[in-house]
Image (cartoon, rainbow, N blue to C red):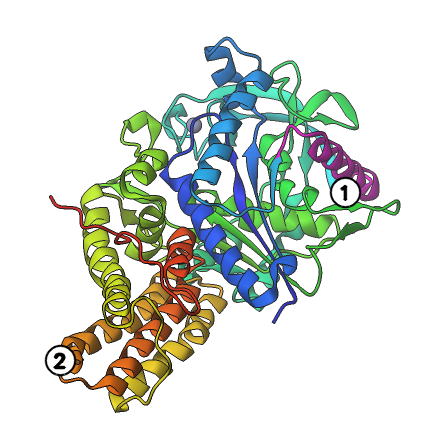
């Protein structure tokens, strides 16, 4: 097992407000970071998120509001930062690509590639191609069928200009070998196969990494050409290393987090997998830096059949959902309802179903009835451990092993949050069923003092184990449970999840 854990979300493009997709990746990363802190210690986990603030789309969005690009990004970035606070995100750092620390680092990386490569890694060439301005992407005539961008279906423009190129083709075979040798490098499996078949079937085109300044001024100037700025993706991907390290005088990268004995994980949406699984490892390799351990591409939240998007006007706001149903309900729903990696259908009905069944009925009920019995039978004092029957012993051992089971599930780079939560709920439901079968109110009536004591103490132990496992997923709920069931005394509050009546 690695000694250190470094996890990132993509840096989000701030041309618009944060949506469900942004919150999904960030909540997933937060859950893993919290989970890993529990096993490695806080000081051995680093969780990075941030914002991608350069490029044409930002420039245009700023123009639309008659703001300078810097004023515009300064305004939007606040929405992201506020949302992460609201959602209980425990990131250790937040990087913005307009910060000096990032700009200086990107220029240094470019200089190293340019100088060390001596024209073999970065070279200048005349570029002619079909360009989609909104997508900031060049397309071949075959891709841009009918002179339309294959991604956004808007007309492409023919552009001819001098640019700088990164010789990605030189590293194609290296990357194919690396993916083949490392089954957990790209996850889930279906995405790994996608990238492999893309790489084995197509020769990689060299990546155009510059934009002429006369066309776009909002970017990081190339250190070797004052007439160009860096292509926004080239700039953005570098955040993963600029935030946690620096180049020494010899051009070697030094980082406390990107080391041989750390586990480096990037969570991304499947729409940006190619940038992360093809260009990014090649950039790192060219810089003499090892690739990350895992790039995990999760699915999309759909509304009906469609991807949520601003242009379709079907965007649900994470802030609104968290306000309406509670932060932890929202976190729970996203991680529980759909296997991580697959697409899911977002609906408020589905959130309410999860809320009423899993949270109000199962978890909320177990905690509330346990507290009520401690209050009623023991005046609020947590009873001592006693001798359990066979069923009770089984539940106690399931509860004791729960954290190990959850850790085993999350320890595989498929990050199966849904199964981990299912495992936790198995134990919750075992305990609830045991209450219904044992009928503690009868034990009380029959004056079976020892049996009742042991029984209620078992419920307390189950809740404590569930609480530990639940903390990474639903931190505020776990803290509230801890606050209500103390070491010796309880302090009963309102039900955690009062049912939502439709
Ligand atoms: Zn386009």
**Which stretch appears magenta?**
96-119
- The location of residue 445, given as percent across then percent down, is 13, 80
Q: Nearer the viewer, mark 1 or mark 2?
A: 2
Label 1 belongs to which residue?
A: 120
As for residue 112 lying within the magenta part, the answer is yes
Q: CA distance from mark 1 to mark 2?
A: 85 Å
Q: Position of residue 203 (x, y in %)?
A: 56, 48
Q: Toward the viewer: 144 or 136?
A: 136
Q: Nearer the viewer, residue 31 or 117?
A: 31
Task: Give the residue furthest to the left.
Answer: 502
- In the figure, 411 relative to 213: above or below? below
Count of marks placed on residues = 2
Magenta: main secondary structure: helix
Kindly state the secondary structure of the residue where label 1 is placed.
loop
What is the x, y in percent for residue 93? 61, 43
Q: Please tell me in which quadrant of the rendered image residue 474 appears.
A: bottom left
Q: Residue furthest top?
A: 66
Residue 208 appears in the rendering: no
- 152 relative to 427, above or below: above
Q: Is residue 93 left or right of residue 107?
A: left
Q: In which of the image's four quarters is ligand 1 placed? A: top left
| Quarter containing the C terminus | top left
Can you identify the residue that label 2 sits on?
445
Q: Quadrant of residue 475?
A: bottom left
From what the image shows, is residue 208 above or below residue 377?
above
User: Where, quadrant-wise, is the N terminus in this rendering?
Assistant: bottom right
Residue at (24, 47) in percent of width and height: 351
Whether residue 458 is visible: yes
**Residue depicted at x 51% and y 49%:** 202
Q: Is residue 290 found left or right of 396 in the rendered image?
A: right
For the point 32% across and 37% down, the residue is: 323
State which tag comes first along the sequence, 1 or 2.
1
């Amino acid at each position: 097992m690695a000694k250190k854990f470094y996890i990132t979300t993509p840096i989000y493009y701030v041309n618009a407000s944060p949506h469900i997709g942004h919150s999904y990746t960030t909540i997933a990363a937060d859950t893993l970071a919290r989970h890993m802190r529990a096993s490695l210690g806080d000081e051995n986990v680093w969780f990075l998120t941030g914002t991608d603030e350069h490029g044409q789309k930002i420039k245009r969005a700023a123009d639309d509001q008659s703001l300078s690009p810097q004023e515009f990004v300064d305004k939007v970035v606040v929405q992201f930062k506020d949302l992460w606070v609201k959602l209980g995100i425990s990131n250790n750092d937040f990087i913005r690509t307009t910060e000096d620390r990032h700009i200086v680092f990107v220029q240094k990386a470019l200089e190293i590639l340019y100088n060390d490569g001596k024209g073999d890694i970065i070279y200048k060439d005349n570029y002619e191609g079909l360009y989609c301005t909104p997508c900031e992407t060049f397309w071949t005539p075959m891709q841009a069928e009918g002179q339309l961008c294959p991604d956004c279906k808007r007309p492409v423009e023919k552009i001819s200009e001098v640019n700088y190129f990164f010789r990605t083709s030189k590293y194609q075979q290296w990357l194919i070998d690396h993916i083949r040798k490392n089954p957990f490098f790209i996850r889930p499996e279906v995405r790994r196969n996608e990238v492999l078949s893309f790489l084995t079937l197509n020769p990689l085109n060299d990546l155009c990494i510059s934009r002429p300044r006369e066309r776009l001024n909002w970017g990081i100037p190339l250190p070797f050409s004052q007439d160009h700025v860096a292509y926004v993706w080239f700039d953005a991907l570098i955040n993963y290393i600029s935030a946690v390290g620096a180049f020494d005088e010899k051009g070697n990268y030094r980082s406390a987090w990107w080391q041989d004995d750390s586990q480096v994980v990037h969570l991304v949406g499947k729409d940006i997998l190619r940038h992360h699984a093809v260009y990014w490892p090649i950039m790192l390799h060219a810089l003499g830096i090892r690739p990350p351990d895992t790039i995990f591409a999760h699915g999309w939240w759909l509304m009906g059949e469609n991807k949520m998007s601003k242009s379709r006007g079907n965007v649900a706001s994470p802030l609104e959902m968290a306000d309406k149903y509670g932060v932890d309900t929202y976190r729970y729903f996203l991680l529980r309802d759909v296997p991580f990696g697959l697409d899911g259908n977002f609906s408020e009905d589905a959130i309410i179903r999860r809320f009423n069944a899993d949270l109000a009925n199962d978890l909320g009920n177990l905690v509330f009835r346990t507290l009520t019995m401690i209050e009623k039978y023991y005046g609020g004092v947590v009873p001592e451990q006693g001798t359990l029957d066979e069923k009770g012993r089984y539940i106690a051992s399931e509860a004791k092993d729960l954290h190990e089971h959850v850790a085993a599930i999350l320890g595989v780079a498929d990050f199966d949050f849904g199964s981990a939560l299912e495992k936790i709920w198995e134990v919750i439901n075992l305990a609830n069923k045991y209450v219904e079968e044992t009928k503690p109110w009868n034990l009380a009536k029959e004056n079976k003092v020892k049996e009742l004591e042991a029984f209620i103490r078992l419920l307390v132990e189950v809740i404590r184990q569930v609480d530990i496992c639940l903390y990474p997923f639903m931190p505020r709920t776990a803290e509230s449970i801890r606050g209500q069931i103390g070491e010796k005394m309880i302090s009963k509050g309102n039900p955690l999840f009062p049912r939502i009546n439709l």
